[in-house]
Amino acid sequence: MPAQTADQTRPAEKRLTVLSGPSGVGKSTVVAHLRQVNPDVWLSVSVTTRAPRPGERDGVQYHFVTDEEFDRLVAEDQLLEWAQFAGNRYGTPRGPVEERLSEGIPVLLEIELQGARQVRESMDDALHVFLAPPSWEELVRRLTGRGTESDDVIRRRLEVAKVELAAEKEFDTTLVNTSVQEVCDELLALMTAPKV
Ligand code: ADP
Ligand code: 5GP
């Protein structure tokens, strides 16, 4: 990773990047690859009320919590942002993010549109990156091909995807996920470059 340079417009301690985009576009794939090639980037582990998919482990992809536990985190203001998405709730634990940012560590949030909007309201220096599919057909192919959701859940996620795609212009920049490697390189460059 290139050395971080001091930048008056965007101090290192505020280096927060939000990656958003429709379900199935490849966010998790890109983030997993990015963590492999650059362990210096810290990825926030969200809490969710969704059930784990096969292979997902508590504390790794998500902290899997009950509805009651999620209610408690919201009531205690322990979430930086949270949202309801396709029948489940997801949120970013506030403490670990603030801790890393205060240490000057680049932080990445992989979250959906409503959460990204909340972060834009509360943290005006964050960089918002939209991950777009090469085409609508390819998005449908990826979401269906992943094989992790029922037809009904896929339909709900594709409905939400139309809303998310329409919000692309709210983001600072768009990366089209044609090649995971290329998107990863571009994302890393954005995360570590001074904001202009
Ligand atoms: P998201 O986290 O955005 O919901 P995933 O990372 O789970 O999406 O990716 C959805 C599916 O698309 C997965 O099967 C993944 O392997 C595949 N995928 C991701 N990126 C690409 C790509 N650049 N080209 C082809 N398939 C991809
Ligand atoms: P999935 O169920 O496919 O893992 O995630 C569904 C959606 O929730 C994705 O768009 C993902 O980016 C988003 N998501 C994951 N964690 C969070 C979070 O902490 N907050 C918000 N707002 N969205 C999240």
Image (spheres, helix red, strand yellow):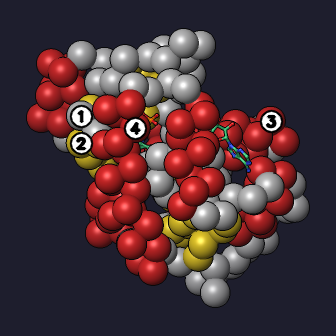
Marks 2 and 1 close (CB-CB < 8 Å): yes
> Which amino acid lies under the numbered mark 3 shown in the image of this protein?
Gln
The mark tally for this picture is 4
Q: Are marks 2 and 4 in contact (CB under 8 Å)?
A: no
Q: Position of residue 182 (x, y in %)?
A: 82, 59
| Relative vertical location of residue 134 with respect to residue 124 in this rendering, above or below | above
- Tag 2's secondary structure? strand
Residue 10 shows in the view: no
Nearer-the-camera pick, 19 or 51: 51
Q: Amino acid at mark 2?
A: Gln
Are the residues at dot 4 and dot 3 in contact (C-beta closer than 8 Å)? no
The residue labelled by disc 4 is 154
Residues at marks 1 and 3, CA–CA distance in whole angstroms: 31 Å
The residue at which mark 2 appears reads as: 84
Q: Is residue 60 above or below residue 22?
A: above
Task: Read off the residue under disc 3.
Answer: 36
Label located before the other in sequence (1 or 3): 3
The image quadrant of residue 51 is: top left
In space, the residues marked 2 and 3 are separated at their CA atoms by: 29 Å
Task: Read off the residue under disc 1.
Answer: 87
Cα–Cα span, label 1 and label 4 = 12 Å
Q: Which callout, 2 or 3, points at the residue further toward the start of the chain?
A: 3
Quadrant in which ligand 1 is drawn: top right
Q: Is residue 68 left or right of residue 113?
A: left
The mark lying in front, picked from 1 and 4, is 4
Q: CA distance from mark 2 to mark 4?
A: 16 Å
Q: Are marks 1 and 4 in contact (CB under 8 Å)?
A: no
